[in-house]
Amino acid sequence: MKNNKHSAKDFALILKAMMERSEREIRELKFSELMNKHFAASAIPKGIHCFSLRLTDEYSSNAHARKQLPSPELLPLLSDNSYYHFVLSTDNILAAAVVVTSAVQSSLKPEKIVFHVITDKKTYAGMHSWFALNPVSPAIIEVKSVHQFDWLTRENIPVLEAVENHYGIRNYYHGNHVSGSNLSDTTTPRKFASKLQARSPKYISLLNHLRIYLPELFPNLDKLVFLDDDVVIQRDLSPLWEIDLNGKVNGAVETCKGEDEWVMSKRFRTYFNFSHLLIAKNLNPDECAWAYGMNIFDLREWRKTNIRDTYHTWLKENLESNLTLWKLGTLPPALIAFRGHVHPIDPSWHMLGLGYQNKTDIENVKKAAVIHYNGQSKPWLEIGFEHLRPFWTKYVNYSNDFIRNCHMLE
């Protein structure tokens, strides 16, 4: 300042400009980091892709990989209501293996467990190979592709077909995510991350919407637990079947009550656009949301309701409004469809947030019956949080030839 003979006022202006430039650069780097994280979360890791391909190849060349699941004498148990029935819908074979293994190892009565694993057509051969070659005895495993369910026809789910084929929707989910996220000066990193996450292509997948059709897909079952593929079971879940849902359909953990403000602060305003007249007229922004990913469903009560039709109606409304009612996935229409049909269960049954915040309390993780890696930082990705990954990897058999040969992240 002395050398250039600046006044104190000039120096203050120069310093302010330098600080503003630094803040701008930091902001740009933050958004760049979020973008890179989004693409890392959306991509299929090389190891998982290799794993799926090798298992698919095994299905075509190895008769043991094609053996019937379950064996013919066990088929009647697939609709036996004295067993504990779990449904898992996924195209990630490794994730499915962890969910099933953790559930069986944590169960006090593993011989009473029946797992219905549902996948898509392209993953079916690999998924079947894995469970045929790696039986999780004494549990019973069924692997089916969506195309093997007679009920899942275009006539029964026209709205979902429209969602998958609509040009605007495909452009939204498969187009340029960055340009479509409105990176303005007023956009905060958190808002930007939320916009990017809302554009994940998984949200228009039939596998993601499948849970709304459980009563039709399993017409002989009375109760079942639906699990997402990014969960780990750490405790026996059989007591869930004993919970009195008081005539409700969906036993779920509420996500607006709890000490963790980041995870347990979700109300309807989090998911819906209340500036839209249709939303403002029909919903209450302060209503408590609940968690998808570990739900006990009473299918008998469900069949008495119009939950599925309500879900379809609102999906159609959002489609016709060009996605202005909500952006993020399958939870918003479910929040509407299940209104009045949800029975809150104890939060210790289902702990959320392990995939999007690294400050998760480890002691709470250890106590939870089910931990859920919802968010971008899945434990099978390099962007997974290192201190939370061991809770998932402990159920991965790294000595297995398929896993070892594909150099899976350990």
Image (cartoon, rainbow, N blue to C red):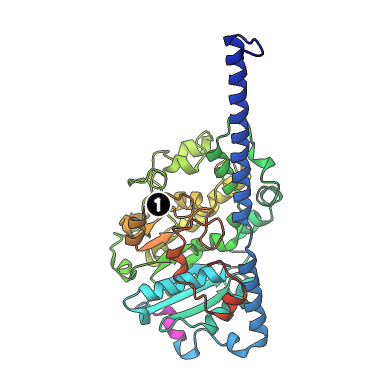
Which residue is denoted by mark 1 in the rendering? 360
58 vs 249: above or below: below
Callout 1, which amino acid?
Thr
Give the tally of numbered discs.
Answer: 1
Q: Position of residue 70 (x, y in %)?
A: 49, 84
- Quadrant position of the N terminus in the picture: top right
Disc 1 crowd, CA 10 A, few/some/many (<14, 14-19, 20+): some
Q: Is residue 383 above or below residue 113?
A: above
- In this view of the protein, which residue sits in the foreground, 113 or 211? 113
Is the magenta region chiefly helix, strand or loop? helix
- Magenta span includes 231: no
Q: Secondary structure at mark 1?
A: loop
Q: Which residues are magenta?
A: 75-80
Is 78 magenta? The answer is yes
Q: Which picture quadrant has residue 372?
A: bottom left
Along the horizontal axis of the image, is 261 left or right of 142?
Answer: left
Residue 124 rendering spot, x and y as whole percentages? 61, 75
Q: Quadrant of residue 352?
A: bottom left
In the rendered image, the vertical position of residue 8 relative to residue 372, given as above or below: above
Q: Residue at x 36, y 55 (%)?
A: 253
* Residue in the image at 47% along x and 85% along y: 75
Q: Residue at x 49, y 61 (%)?
A: 212
Q: Nearer the viewer, residue 184 or 25?
A: 25
